[in-house]
Structure formats: C-alpha cells, structure tokens
C-alpha cells in the first residue's frame, strides 16, 4: 500500500485540498472528523458496529444524531466548524443526512422560497432552531412525479377563514414522507386548492402534525411509519392522511399566490414557481450521491491493490477489467465534484430568487431545471453503475455486510427514483433542448441560457447539421487529449444531430412517447457533455489556474479520460448519425485503454484525495493501511452469535443428525 | 387487470404448462404450492412477514425449513411430489435454496463425482438421509476463483496412515462456506497435498467438523459464522480453520487419484476432473437465477399495469421506457428456461460421467465448461440488469422492503461473484473459442463439440471472415423475424470476426490481459447467441413441435425479440468489425421498438405463465388481482412500531420541540 501511495505522480495533499475546496476547508474538515469520531451520539463506538444496527436501533440512533447535532451547533461558537461537523455526520450516516435534509432542504426551502415576509418572519426562527421539526408532504401513495394527478384537497371555508385539508381516497395518502413516521411536528403539504367552488391549482400549506410536548398526533391527522425499506432504516419515512384538517388562511404559503379575505384568489405568475424547490433538492441529491459513491470507490480501490489473484498471484488491480472500470469512476467523482462550483453559483441565484425580477427568475429557473434534471438523472444512473462495479470489484467479499458497500447499495435505492423519475426528467430536458433547436433553426433565436457551459452550442446548429462525419483522423485521435475542444465540438455535433433526428421523426408523425428512449439517451449525453465541457475549461491547458502544478496535471488527465469515456459510452449516438465510424470507435477504445493503463498507479493517490478516515468508511476491507484481512476477521469475530452451538441446534439440527 | 389478462392473444394456461415442463408437472407444482402455503415451518404465516425477519430469525427459520423438509420427504410416499415440494420451498426461500444446495449440489456432488465406490457406499446413504450435514470448503479468506493459490495443506503422515489438514495463515481460513457457521457436521475440503515431501496437487478430503449429538466443534477444528451479509441472512456462511486436523487416508476422495499405503501417489488423468463439480454448480446457479428474477419481473409487470402516472393518467406500462425494457426481460426468462432442456441433457451426461470412457468424459467436460462458464456469467449480468430494471419500474415504491424486489436484490449479491468471477470465466470461454478458431483456420480441424448449438459454426470460419459487411437490406430487416437463420448467421459472423481480431492482436504482441475486456464481451455475445440459436431451432417455424398453436406463436415472437435484442445490445461488436453500419443499427432499433409495442399487451399473460401464487411472491405490490394499494397499506399497518409515539420521543424529540 505504501508503494502504491508512493507511485502517485502528483501531490496527494494538494488534490485533497482541491477536493475539500481549499487548504482551510481541508483543515476544517479534518477537525470536524476528529470531533465526531469519539462522540458516541454521533458515531457508533466500537466494538458496536454501525452496519449491525436493527431498524429500531437505526431509527433511534439517527434521531439521536439530529438531537445531538442541534446541541453541538448551539455549543460551538465557530459556526463554520459547526456546519462542517454537520457535513461530517452527513457523510458518516446517510439516514442522518436524509433526516436533516428533509427538515432543511425540503421543509425550510419551501417556507423560505414560497412564504411571504410575514410567514417567513413567523416560521423561519422556529425552523432554524428546530423548535419545530418539518417534513415535506408531496408524493402520495398513488402519485409521485406527475404532480397534476395529486388527490389531496384544500378547500377554502370563507366563513371560518380556514382551509380544510382532506385525503379523499386511500391513494391520496401522503406517502414516503421523511420524518412523518415518528418525528415531524409540522409539514408543508401540497394540495389541489378550491376557493368558492373554483379550482385554483396546487398550493402549499403548513400543517401541524403532532403536539410539541407529547408527540401525539393532532386531531384530524392520521400518520404512521411505512415500515421496512430497502435502505435508510434510520429515517422514519411515513404516511399522512388528513381528515378535514383545518388550518387558517395564513398558513397557505403566499409569496407567489394570494388569497384575500373575501375569496379573491391571485394566482402565481407561472405555476412553475410552485415547484422551484425541487431544483435545489435535485442539486442536493447530486452532492449526496458523490459523497456516498466516492466512499465505495475508495473501498473498492484499496481492496483492489491488496487482493491478489490469478496465475501469477497478481494484484487484482492489474487486470484490465479492474482498472479500466475503476478509473472512469474516480474521474467521474472529480468531474462532478469540480462542477459543483458552477452549480453552486446557479443554486445561490435560485434560492435568493425572490430578489430578482420575475422574468429573469423564471427564465433562470427554466434553464436550471433542464440542466439539474438531466444532471441528477445522469449522475444517478452512472453512480448506480459505479456502485455495482465497486461491489463486483470486491469479488466474494462483495457479499459481506462489513464491506459497507452493501449498506450503501441499500441506501442507494432512493436515488434513482427519489427527486423525480429519470425518464420523465430526461425527457423534459430533451424537450427544452429541442425547443431551443427549433427556435434557432426556424427563427435564428440563440438560446439565452445563463450558464456558459450549458446549451450555448445550439447557436451553431445549422453549421453542425451540415457536417457529415467526424474529420478527426483516427490515427491521430490522441490529439483530443491535448486540445479538449476537438472532443467538445464532436459531442456538440452529435447532440445537435440527435435532437434534430428526434424533431424530424415527431414532425413525421411519431408520438413523443415513440421517441422517449431516444430523448432520454441524448439528454443523458447532454449532462455528460456538460461535465466534460465545464471541466475542460477548468482544467484545460489554455487557461491559467490556481491549482498546484501536479494536481492540475492529474486533473487535466482525468478530464481527458472522462471526455474519451463519454465518447465511447455514447458512441451509438454518433454512429446512428453516421458521424462516427468503426475506425473512430476502434481508435477511441484503444486510446482509452492505454490511458487507463498509464493511470493505473494513480488510483490510490486519487482515492486518498477524497480523504475519508477509516471510521467513516466503516469497512475493514477498505482500510487505509492495507491490513485488511486481520481487520476483517476481527470485525466478524465481534458480530453476535457467530461462535458456539446455535440456539436452534436442539430444535432443528439434532433431530436430523442424532437419530438412532 | 382482468382486461390486461384478456388481452393476451395466446392461451395462458398452455404457456404455464410449457414453463412448468408439461401439464402433469404444472398440476404437481400447484399441488406442491398448496401444500406448503399453510405449513408454518415451511412458509411464514401472516400476519408475520417473511420480509421482516431479523438475521437470527432467518437463520433459525431456514434451518427449520430444512429439518421440516427432511420430515416431509420421509412422510410423502409420492417421491415426485416430495421433490416438487422441495422445489417449491426452494423458490419461496433463497436462503433455504442455498442451504439445501450446499448439501446436495456441492457436498453430495463432490462425494458422488470424486469418491470411489467404497467411499460412495459408506457416505452416500448418510448424505441422502441427512444424517450428516455437509458443506463445501473451497474458497479461502484470501483466495477464490484461482484455486492454484489456495493455502490449506494436507500432509500425509505415512506412519499413522493419516492426512494432517492445516490452515497455515489467516488468509488460508476457509471462508464463505455455506452451513459451516452453525450447522454442518462434515465438509469436503480442497487442499494442497504433500506426500513424502512431494507436492501432489489439489485434492479433496472429507473432514468431520461437529459432533453429531452435541453440535460442538470437533477437536482441532475452529469454525464460526461470518456474520452479517448483504443477503441470504438465513444461511450460516462460515469460516473454518484446521489446526493439524487428522483424517484417515480413506477420507481422501479417490475416484481419480489414489494414494497407496506405501506412499505411492497416482495422480488424476487430468487435474480438471477435480473441478468438474463446478460445472453443475454453475448450471444450478442459472436455474436459481431465473427462478428468482422471474418473480421480480412478475411483480414489476403487475405494478406497471396498475400504476397510473403522467398527463393523461396513463398506465405506466404504456410508456416506451417501461415496455421496451420489461419485454426483453420476459423474453429472456423464457429463452433461458427453454434452454434448460438442452443443458439438462448435458448435465446428466456429466454427472453420470464416471460411466463414460475417460477421453470422451474429459472432452465433454471441456466443452461444457466453456458453455456453462459463459452462460452463468452472461445470465448473471443480464439478470442483474433486469433486477435493477424491475426495481426502477416500481418508481418510489422500489424503496419499500415489501415490494420483495429489494430482498431479492440483497440475495442477488452472491450471483455475480459466487461460482466464479465473470471476468475470468468469460475469458476462459473466449480462449477455448479462439483455440478452436485457430485449429480450424490453421489446420482445418472442425470443433467436435457435443452440443449442436454451441460453437459448431467455427467450421465456417474462413467463409465468414471473407464477408465484408452484412448483406441484409435495412429496409427489409423484418425478414429476420420470419427466418431466424438470417440473424443467427449474422451473429456467427460477428463472433468469428471478433475472435479473429483478438487473436491477431495477441499475435502482434498484445498481452492476454490487454484483450481481456474484448474477450469478455465476445464470450458474453457467444452465450447470448447460444440462447437465441437453441430457441430459434426450438420455436422456429420450420420445425413441427408439440406445443399448442397459440403458445408456439408467442414463444416464436419472443425468440425473435430476443434475437433482435442481442443484435442491438452487442451492435458495437458488429460495428467494430465494419460488418454492421448505421443504417442497420437504426433499422434494428426501429423494428425492435415496434415489436415491443406490438407485444405490450402480452406482458400480463406472459408473467402469469410463470404461475407464481401471491404468497410466494410476498409482494402486495405484485398482487395477482391488481388490488395493490389496499394490500400494501395493510402490510405496512402490520409492521412493528409504525404507529404511536416512538420509544425515542422523550430522549431525542422532546428536548428539541419542548423548550421554554
């Protein structure tokens, strides 16, 4: 392992700084890790094993983390450290991350983005101090992504100046609501609104669920836990049914809509603002996905260099099947992480959205919706594949719960469906892009995206459609790795051509659904391209940057690897447009494998750059010092009921083996 | 749901008969299901939920199933029914399947295939009556697929006429051994054998692990459970360490090798015979995979026709993303199931192998190894993808443990690694095929495979290599669906060309590892082709068969769908050889989507054909009558601790919400 670390041709500490967001942030992160490591209410202390907790224990321990975290936040004077501690616990425990995320990213964002000043003044201090615990009642037992189908109703009773919230059917039960099972005292709920007999669209209401002193349900509210899940056993996902629950008019969130006392309803300028909170949720999910998956990648990489197998008793990492699959995974982690910078800026503009003029805000939101929907979906699917790659990289030990990857795979369950199903999300992105393409081709309107690296290339649509095939000589494909713009442009052309083909098919009579899978694929490629283009600019050689030279060099190479990987992975798109040919594909494949082989010995340094301490990874098989077998055996020996005659011997074994 | 059933344009009962293996077998299967459904020791009785059992409960319940099953087998006079009951429990519980499989498929097969007559006479009655419980000690903590690296030793002590079995290091601990954790009284163990100071290869020994009356470990044997796993919590996978454990010479399995009293060692005619038991294991795994995954496909399909979503509140099955993914999955289930017939014949030849002459047996084994290795790997990976497709098809409810798919995904963990890692297995297949190709090209030797549908096409290698591109007009691609030989031949040509390209690269200096990923891909395609070709013959229109007409018709269409799917999925292989072009790919894609659309309404009938009763599927979301939401809600309400104030309220919630 030491040899593998020394083989890194870059300064690992510098890459760790980059990953953390700078030297100060790295120091702060390490301080936060040290702080939580020995806190028994934040981290399960050995010999007890986090991976062995039952559902009940997980539910309790996770709420304990939330409670303790609130205390730590109050006690710590350094608020930057406090939020870093929160992030550390977040990384340590996905269930904690989700409980906290429900309260702050979902409940808080809805109040903050959709509440008017009076409402914010009243509710925000309670939310921020966790004197109330919030949840987010959107999805229903029978309805999720397509909000228009929601069944929960809110009917205005003008006489009482109250809304009556009602769950009219079993399928209208709010379902999957994080923290609704045991914990939440309040919820925001989205409901079909009727005022004076007239349907006024979907609106958000604040409803109290439980008594603050007793934890008992409020009258006319039914709620419970949804029981066992595939992962996140620490989160009390729940269901809620409203039985003519009454809330005052003042609890309808009214930044964008208003209902006057006399029943006059002022609708939102654009119904889309009511779903604006879903964008930060999706960007938040991308952050969480990278946090989770980079841990699994670390574990798989370390195991891969320690484990030996085969005729020559080689390190398994030396096999092509290993390094050509783990390298794009590592490179992907860095690409997404680096692009957070770009996304964070957008995110900030959005959440402070109320302070911009309406038209700009709505335009910005539409753009960010297209990008975030594609990105969340593409990152979700890629990470899903990467987790499976990591699992398989562990060989037989993939099967042990103590590799920690199995636990992550369980928790992962929510990411490819939660926050929106990927098919409609990607379809929406493809539609936005097609619309812009048509505007460009028919009327010469260039897209006014706010992001430099998003869909600006549509302005070249006419020129790109005229290109018949890639003019890069396969024999000189390696030039792409020096000048990233060669690859960027190729991907631009492929996307334009695919969008155009889809558009033509629809014009000729194909339904939108007939083109669904094609739309999904091109939108996925669009997100993959965004990551490449954004980082090609960041790590390309033409632009000076502040990174230390060896760190800049390895990130440059990882960017090239990602670009090449995208070209190969989505080669079908280029082939179908006659733009790529067999010789391109063969050359790209060869170059890609060579590049991976060249980078094989950078893997340990690169995963060290994520800087996860052992206690956080929870995996004896991913131990930093490489002494994995002893650690693993010790972990097994500490598990309950692993030695001695089992409790069921007399009942079920002896009757077979001890017959006369 | 009734409407969906009625939409089937074939007789569902006839397809169910086909799936079951005939009318009598279907009746027997239904009888067996009815028999186990109410037996509390074989099936968890409601309101208790199988999916809620803890690890301890699962371990005990599963061994209870084994014990009860032994009793049922003794009691039932109809032995065909008894083995059908065993199969039913097998399908109901993967953990049971594995416990029983370890004893019968692994332990029993080793004794039966590698033991001499005396040994079989002594041990087989004990094994068959389960008076001893066996396990299979092959893999070690530090070693798995590559057996040559195993560290456990067996040293002959001539004076005592005994072998001394020893685990010299921590990494030599036998690991993952099913039933070694709590239950097994005996094991077969594979060890590096030394006689008179001379290494005599790997040999198998029978060693007693536990006392039959007390369950206590035997002296000089250490063993325990490996604790928590990703799935199969009912199986006590364990570790074993031998501390100079002594066994008499007669416990070295001696069908193929012999050690005389004077220390003269007669080696096996071919070391491969010592691993011959791995072939039935792999074929057995394929059977199990289809049993498991066809259940998940049933659940996802039923959910897909009940669930409605989107603008028009459509059945989600009407979306292209749904039916184009579930249809190839269903078709794949039927293809593999049908090809069992072919495999079973081979399997029978192999297990009765001792009765053939040695040369024929070894040749047969080599051939079957190549096919079974590729098939286990390809089926494993495809099923893995299908399970993920099923999971995602459940939308948000993918996340509930009560959909049963999450449980299957956990159990699934073992299939893509257990029984051999797919990369080396597929590489081995590719090597066998390449060797045969070289023999054909250089010396005109046609492969003497025993199976008509395996690699016979290599005899046309010269002719196929001379073909430059596919001569099928893309505009008439639908002809492939009438005459399957068009597709079969195209796939043959692609495989030959790819093998030849790999061979040429190696000749030019590429290492075997440089060609690993290419080899893996072509071997995967070979297995996919085998399924198509085998079924093209079975369900093609040219051959009369005994199937009822409507069943024959749907199976014919499913075969075409599978062939087309293979062409598209492995199109990269044809593209890279300049054999397929953009127009082929576009035409195939269009035809495939059209075919799927045409078959959309056959899905419920086809999954009904698997004939799984509700209790066996365990999934309220996959209920046969389509009344899923009520069933699901009822399941949730029966879970522990789902309503009322949680136990941790006073400790972790009140301190936040009830502050003054």
Image (cartoon, coloured by chain):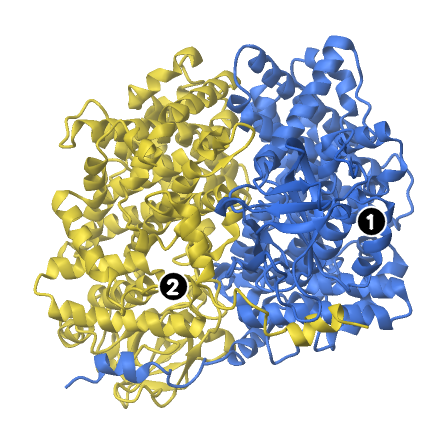
Chain colours: A yellow, B blue
Q: Say left or right for A85 vs B446.
A: left
> From the viewer's perspective, is residue B317 above or below residue A242?
above
The mark lying in front, picked from 2 and 1, is 1
Residue at 41% from the left image edge and 86% from the top image edge: B644
- At a point 76% along the width and 34% down the height, the residue shown is B368
Residue A483 picture location, percent across and down = 28, 20
The quadrant of the rendering that contains the C terminus of chain A is bottom right
Q: Residue A456: x and y, percent? A: 28, 34
Q: In the image, B599: left or right of B237?
A: right
C-alpha gap between disc 2 and disc 1: 47 Å
Name the image quarter holding residue A181.
Answer: bottom left
Is residue B641 shown to the viewer in this render? yes
Tell me the quarter of the image containing the N terminus of chain A. top left
Q: Please tell me if label 2 and label 1 are on a single chain.
A: no
Of residue A366 and residue B142, the one placed in the foreground of this image is: B142
Vertical comparison of B253 with B317: above or below: above
Image position of A159 with respect to B532: above or below: below
Name which residue lies at 62% across and 26% down: B584
Question: Depth check: A268 or A340 in front?
Answer: A340
Residue lying furthest left: A77
Q: In the rendering, at what x and y percent does residue A90 appear? A: 28, 59
The subunit letter for the residue under badge 2 reads: A
Residue A523 visible in rendering: no
Question: Please, what secondary structure does the residue beneath circle 1 have?
Answer: helix
**What residue sits right under mark 1 in the picture?**
B119
For mark 2, give the secondary structure. Answer: helix
Q: Is residue A630 left or right of residue A76?
A: right
Q: Residue at x 57, y 69 (%)?
A: B51
Q: Which residue is mark 2?
A: A50
């Amino acid at each position: 392992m030491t040899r593998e670390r020394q083989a890194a041709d870059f300064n690992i500490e510098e890459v760790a700084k980059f990953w953390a967001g700078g030297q100060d942030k790295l120091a702060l992160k390490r301080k936060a890790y040290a702080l939580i490591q020995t806190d028994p209410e934040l981290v399960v202390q050995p010999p007890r094993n986090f991976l062995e907790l039952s559902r009940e224990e997980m539910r309790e321990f996770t709420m304990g983390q939330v409670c303790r975290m609130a205390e730590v936040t109050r006690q710590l004077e350094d608020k930057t450290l406090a939020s870093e501690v929160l992030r550390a616990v977040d990384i340590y425990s996905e269930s904690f991350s989700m409980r906290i995320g429900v309260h702050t990213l979902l409940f808080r964002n809805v109040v903050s983005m959709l509440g008017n000043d009076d409402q914010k003044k009243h509710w925000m201090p309670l939310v921020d101090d966790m004197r109330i615990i919030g949840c987010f009642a959107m999805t229903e037992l029978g309805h999720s992504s397509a909000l228009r189908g929601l069944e929960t109703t809110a009917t205005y009773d003008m006489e009482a100046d109250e809304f009556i919230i009602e769950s009219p059917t079993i399928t209208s039960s709010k379902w999957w609501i994080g923290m609704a099972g045991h914990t939440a005292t309040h919820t925001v709920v989205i409901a079909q609104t009727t005022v004076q007999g007239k349907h006024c669209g979907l609106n958000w209401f604040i409803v109290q669920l439980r008594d603050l002193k007793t934890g008992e349900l409020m009258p006319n509210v039914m709620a419970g836990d949804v029981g066992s899940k595939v992962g996140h056993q620490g989160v009390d996902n729940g269901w809620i049914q409203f039985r003519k629950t009454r809330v005052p008019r003042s609890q309808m969130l009214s930044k964008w809509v208003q209902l006057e006392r006399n029943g006059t309803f002022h609708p939102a300028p654009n119904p889309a603002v009511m779903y604006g909170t879903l964008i930060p949720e999706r960007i938040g999910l991308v952050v969480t996905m990278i946090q989770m998956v980079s841990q699994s990648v670390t574990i798989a990489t370390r195991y891969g260099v320690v484990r030996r197998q085969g005729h020559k008793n080689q390190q398994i990492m030396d096999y092509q099947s290993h390094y050509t699959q783990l390298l794009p995974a590592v490179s992907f982690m860095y690409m997404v992480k680096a692009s957070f910078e770009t996304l964070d800026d957008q995110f900030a503009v959005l959440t402070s959205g109320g302070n911009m003029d309406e038209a700009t805000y709505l335009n910005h939101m539409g753009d960010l919706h297209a990008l975030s929907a594609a990105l969340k979906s593409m990152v979700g699917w890629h990470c899903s594949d990467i987790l499976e790659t990591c699992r398989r990289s562990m060989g037989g030990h993939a099967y042990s719960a103590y590799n920690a990857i199995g636990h992550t795979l369980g928790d992962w369950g929510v990411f490819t469906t939660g926050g929106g199903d990927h098919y409609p999300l990607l379809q929406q992105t493809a539609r936005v892009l097609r619309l812009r393409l048509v505007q460009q081709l028919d009327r010469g309107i260039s897209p006014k995206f706010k992001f430099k690296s998003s869909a600006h290339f549509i302005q070249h649509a006419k020129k790109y459609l005229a290109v018949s095939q890639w003019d890069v000589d396969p024999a000189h494909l390696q030039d792409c790795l020096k000048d990233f713009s060669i690859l960027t442009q190729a991907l631009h052309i492929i996307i334009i051509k695919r969008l155009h083909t889809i558009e033509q098919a629809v014009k000729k009579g194909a339904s939108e659904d007939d083109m669904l899978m094609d739309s999904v694929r091109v939108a996925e490629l669009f997100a993959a391209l965004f990551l490449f283009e954004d980082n090609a600019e960041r790590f390309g050689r033409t632009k000076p940057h502040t990174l230390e030279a060896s760190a800049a060099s390895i990130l440059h190479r990882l960017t090239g690897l990602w670009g090449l990987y995208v070209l190969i992975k989505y080669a079908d798109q280029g082939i179908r447009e006659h733009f790529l040919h067999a010789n391109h594909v063969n050359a790209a494949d060869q170059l890609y494998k060579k590049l991976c082989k060249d980078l094989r010995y950078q893997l340990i340094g690169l995963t060290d750059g994520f800087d996860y301490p052992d206690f956080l990874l929870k995996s004896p098989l991913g131990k930093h010092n490489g002494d994995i077998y002893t650690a693993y055996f010790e972990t097994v020996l500490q598990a309950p009921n692993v030695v001695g005659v089992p409790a069921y011997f007399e009942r079920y074994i002896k009757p077979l083996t001890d017959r006369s």
